[in-house]
Amino acid sequence: DAGVTQSPTHLIKTRGQQVTLRCSPKSGHDTVSWYQQALGQGPQFIFQYYEEEERQRGNFPDRFSGHQFPNYSSELNVNALLLGDSALYLCASSRTGTDKRIQYFGPGTRLLVL
Amino acid sequence: GQSLEQPSEVTAVEGAIVQINCTYQTSGFYGLSWYQQHDGGAPTFLSYNGLDGLEETGRFSSFLSRSDSYGYLLLQELQMKDSASYFCAVRVSGSARQLTFGSGTQLTVLP
């Protein structure tokens, strides 16, 4: 049973560029959440997707957008990259109607903006 | 909004017991979760408290007092592999699958 997978594992971009990160949820899961984790900090909620729609959003600017596909996989897009966007981006999945206590996290994509 | 406070660092020796505290301020509190994260790894779920009291899972236990807005994670019989960051996270009503994390506690286990 594959867990949550994310790609790429590492990425280097320059200011002003755009980036797309990808996530495949754990088998059987239909809800995907994205988190940003700066060095030495806890993950911060960006947004959550269910049924191909953004359901909840954290305190992040519109430069951060996402998408969920019919197979439940998801993308996170960040436009006009800033140095402060350098962080570990985590994807977490869960299944609607089941235990809401547990989120399953992927290993993350480490983004460096130069 | 929500805010959580936990110690930034804790050090203990193998075989010892360590307690990591977490205080929170939030409206619509629903439950408190604990996650472990090794360097470069994914956060993994450890424990959850929705009601007051103690939850035990093997060497790990977690406690919640809703009236005090306080919880803790207790790790017993510490092992070297327990060296990691530990995060408390709150769930709030209406956003059950959205977690708000604390800044994390770096636990170092010494031989």
Image (spheres, rainbow, N blue to C red):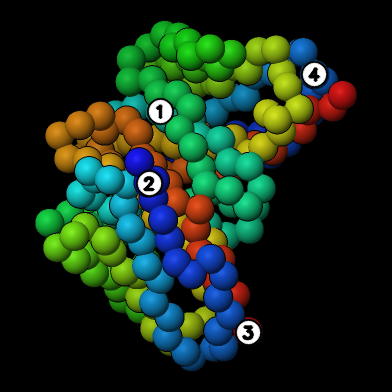
Which residue does the numbered mark 2 point to in the structure image? A2
Quadrant position of residue B103: top right
Q: Amino acid at mark 1?
A: Leu
Quadrant for the N terminus of chain A in the image: top left
Marks 1 and 2 on same chain:
no
Do marks 4 and 3 share a subunit? no
Q: Which mark is residue B14?
A: 4
Element type where label 4 sits in the image: loop
Numbered badge on residue A40: none
- Residue sitting at the far right: B111
The residue drawn where x is 49% and y is 37% is B44
Q: What's the distance in space between the residues labelled 2 and 4, CA to CA?
A: 33 Å
Left or right of B17: which side holds B5? left
Apparent side of residue B57 relative to residue B39 in the rendered image (left or right) = left
The residue at 45%/56% (across/down) is A90
Q: Chain of mark 4?
A: B
Instruction: Give the vertical position of A93 relative to A108 (above or below).
Output: above
- Corner quadrant of residue A15: bottom right
Task: Find numbered disc 1 in the image and state the secondary structure of the residue it sits on.
Answer: strand
- In 3D space, how far apart are the residues under numbered discs 1 and 2 (Cα atoms)? 27 Å
| Cβ–Cβ under 8 Å for marks 2 and 4 | no
Q: Is residue B65 above or below residue B87?
A: above
The residue at which mark 1 appears reads as: B32
Single out the mark in the foreground, 4 or 1: 4
- Same chain for marks 2 and 4? no
Q: Mark 4 vs mark 1: which is more N-terminal?
A: 4
Q: Residue furthest front?
A: A1
Between circles 2 and 4, the one closer to the viewer is 2
- Residue B40 in the image: state x and y as whole percent: 63, 52
Q: Which residue is mark 3?
A: A114
